[in-house]
Every structure is written in C-alpha cells, then in structure tokens.
Image (cartoon, helix red, strand yellow):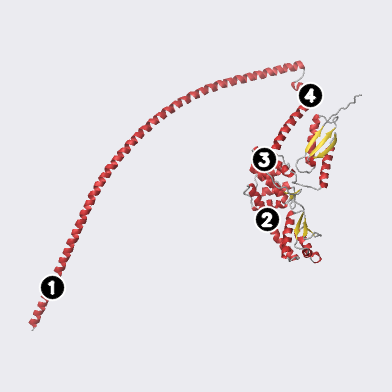
Amino acid sequence: MEYIIIFLSLLAGLLLGILTGWFWFSKGKRISNALRTEISSLEQQLNKLEGKISETEVKAKAAEAEARAQAREILSEAKIKANELESKLEKDEARLEEKERNLTERMQENERQRTALAQKLKDVEDLKAELTQSSAQHREALEKVAKLTEAQAREQLWDQIKTEYAGHFASQIKLLKQGMEDEVEEKAKNLLAEAMQRYASEVATESTATIVQLPSDDVKGKIIGKEGRNIIAFEEATGVDIIIDDTPGAIVISGYDLARRYVAKLAMEKLVKDGRIQPARIEEIVGKMKEQVSKMMLEFGKRATEELGITGYPQDLLKIIGRLRFRTSYGQNILKHSVEMANIGRMLAEEIGADAQIVAEGCLLHDIGKALDHEVSGTHVEIGLEICKRYKVRPEVLHCIAAHHEDVPIASPEAFIVAAADAVSGARPGARRESFEAYLKRLKNLEDLAKGFEGVQRAFAISAGREIRVYVDVKKIDDLMQEQLAKDIARKIEGELTYPGVIKVNVIRERRIEEAAK
C-alpha cells in the first residue's frame, strides 16, 4: 500500500513537472515571437532614420555650397568697397594737404602784413609825439606873444562868446530841445495810443454806498430791532453804517471800506432771507460771511494772475492781491487798475523790446501795499516792498514797485514803463473822480505854487489841473532863466503837491511893443 502511494506521488510529480515545462515552453515561444516582431519594427525605423540622415546630409552639403558662394560674393563686394574707400581717402588726403599748404601761405602773408602794420603804427606814434611836441612849442610861443596862458585865453574867449551869442545860443538850444521834445512826444503818443487802442476795458467808479433790496418794508422793523439792538449789533459787527430812510423796499449800507461793505451786504441778504434777525444770529452770520469773503479774495488773486500768465506766487500773496479788489483810489478799483496797467504795460514793453513779464508783475504788484496800508504804518510803496521781499519777488520787479512814484530814481526801462502805464490807467477819462471842493483846492494850490516864484506875473491851471501855464515878466526873466524856471516849478510841484497823472509846466515869455501912429 505504501508503494502504491509513493508510486502515485511520483506519477503526480512527473505529470506536474511535464505540465510546468510545457507551460514555460509555450510562454518562451510567445515571448520570442514578440521580440522578433519588435526587432523587425526597430530595424524598419532604423532604416527610415538612415534615409532621413542621408537626405539631411545632402541638404547640408547643398546649404554649405550655397553659403560658400554667398561668402565669396560678399567678400568680393567688400574688396570693391574697400578699394573705393581707399581711393576716396587718398583724394581727401591730397585735398587736405593742398589746403594745409594754402593755409600756411596765408599765415605767412598775414605775418608779413602784421609786421608791416606794426611798423606803420610805430611811425604814426612817432609822428603823433612829434606833432604833440610841435603843438606844445607853438602854444608856448603864442602864450609869450599874447602874454596869456591857454586857460586865460580860453576863458576870455568863452566870456566874449557868451556875451555876444548868449541869445543866439539860447534860441538854438530852445529850438533843438523843442524839436527833440516834439519828436519824442509824438513817438510816445503813438506808442500809448496804440497800446490803449489794443486794450479796452470798462470804465466804472466805485461808490461809498451799497443798496440792499428788501422783500417788504416790514423787514425794516426787524432790522432795527427792539430799541435799535439789531441795527447797533450789525453796525458793530461789520464796521459800516446802515441808513434806513423812506426809500421803499431798500436800505443803504454806507462805508469807505469795500470789503466791509461787501461782508455787510452778504450778511444782510442772508439775514433777510432767513428771517431770524437778532444779535447772536447777526454775529454768527457776519463771521461766516467774513470767511466767505476771505476765500473770494484768494479766488480774485488767482484770476488776476491767471489772466496775466503769472505763476509761482504763494497763496498768501495771492490773497493779498485779491484784497485789492476791495480797495479804491479816487473811486478806481485798485485790482482792476493793476490788471489794466499790466495789459497796457506789456504792450508797451513788447513795442520797445523790454521784458514784458517783469513789467506785468511790476504793474500787478505796484500798489499791493494799499491792501494793508490801513493796518500797517508807512507809505503804500514801503509796505508793498516789504510784502514782496517777504515772498521772494525778484529784484527787477521790486525796483519797478519802488520807482513807480519816483521815490527812487528809475534805473530800468521796465520801471519806466510801469510808471507810464500807471499814469495812463489813472489819468484816462472816467477812471478816477474826486469831490468838487478837492478839485478846486488842488487847482488853487497849483496856481499859488507857480505864483510864488520871482518874475511870475500870472499862472493858470488848465486841462483839469494837468497843465499849468505861467506868464513871466520879460524884463526879469530871459530865455535861459525861462528854461530854469520851468524846471524849478516842475520840481517843486513834484515835491509838495499830490496829484494824479502828470502835470505839464508851460512857461510863457512874451514881449509886445506897441506904438501909435498919429
């Protein structure tokens, strides 16, 4: 039994070994077939790659041949251009050598001429020295003969000529001076006329009162308030006078300060519209309106500088410029006057070739001191200079400000133009006004000043005080003294009187001889 089991076990192991060997034999055969197929595929791909490599080698050889041909062609062209450039350089070198030879010859010729000229100058100097020596000897001989020195002879001759020809010289000087003055005056008139014709602005004077319209007369009682408390509080807060009369539907705000009047006008309109008029409300509204007007001043300053093309000013300076909108001179608004001056001055500067930008700035800032002259001591010129120095305004403009009233001598054409534009803007018809009493007083002072000179018989102020005609005694005043008298009168007017524009001094010396035929 045991042998059978062992036999069966061996038989089973044999069968299992046969089956296992058959399995691995079949599997190796399949793997071999797959490897043969893959090797065949790889051989085919290798053949294709060898074909492509052969084709690429052919193309590379063709490209190499083409590149060699192009390189030979480029090398040939470069050799041709190099030959042409070498030929051109040889020609330029020859030309430069020729010019160098010519320049050397010219330098040699100039040196010969310089030597000859130096010799001639030396000869001239020798002749001058000889002539000076001869002249001195001749003068000494004349002095010995005349028994007078040269200075004494010259003085005697001058005294004689002055005695004999004083009248003739005076008349000739007068004619020449008159001719030059007429010519200069004509040119100046043409320039001023052209500038004024090119710039035209509205003519309006500022008054000292402002009218506020009311919705009804019942509001007047609210404005006055109980026992006048409201109107008193309003006048104290604004610094103006309120005039309530019989004019229907209106009240009048009176005051010389335009800024205060404008604040009062805005505050009154606001209070009337609001309806609550009481001292506390008045103070509140007036404070707000002052802030609003302060902002308006800055805006006015910006507008003025933008109109004139001026940039770079700080806001504080622009605000001071804007304050001029609320200042007047003889009824003329100072900011409008300054802007008008700048436009006229710029045209004049362009005509005569001066710096138009300096003129424009000088005109705009010339009266800036008037914005603070009621708060700071000193003349408006001194105050204006201090303000402009504080804000680093350039020196050329400072000189225009200082010299526009000739407080300092005018030292530049721009300063002269600023002074002329100031006179034109302030003196044109309608620009300024003054009271009748002040006008008569100004004319009387002008006539009295002229009559105070010795030899003056009569004096008349004409053309609204822009000309003074002075008649002199012909026995006391001759032609030379007449000219000096006109200068003295003009100088005294400048030093003692205040006046707008320019005053022309006309001294008249007329001799009349009458005889009766019987």
- The amino acid marked with disc number 4 is Tyr
- The amino acid marked with disc number 1 is Leu
Q: How far apart are marks 1 and 4 (CA)?
A: 167 Å
Mark 1 secondary-structure assignment = helix
User: To which residue does mark 1 refer?
Assistant: 19
Give the tally of numbered discs: 4
Instruction: Determine if residue 7 is in view.
Output: yes
Observer-side mark, 1 or 2, equals 2
Q: How far apart are marks 1 and 2 (CA)?
A: 117 Å
Between residues 146 and 190, which one lies in front from this camera angle? 190
Q: How far apart are marks 1 and 3 (CA)?
A: 129 Å
| Left-right relation of 114 to 56 | right
Mark 3 closeness class: few <14, some 14–19, many ≥20 residues within 10 Å: many
Mark 4 secondary-structure assignment = helix
Q: Distance between the residues labelled 2 and 4?
A: 68 Å
User: To which residue does mark 4 refer?
Assistant: 165
Mark 2 closeness class: few <14, some 14–19, many ≥20 residues within 10 Å: some
User: To which residue does mark 3 refer?
Assistant: 348
Q: In this view, does 82 lie above or below 123?
A: below
User: To which residue does mark 2 refer?
Assistant: 296
Screen quadrant of the C terminus: top right
Mark 4 closeness class: few <14, some 14–19, many ≥20 residues within 10 Å: few
Q: Which residue sits furthest right?
A: 518
For image coordinates 66% across by 54% down, the residue present is: 299
- The amino acid marked with disc number 3 is Leu
For image coordinates 74% across by 21% down, the residue present is: 150
State if disc 3 and disc 2 touch (CB < 8 Å). Answer: no
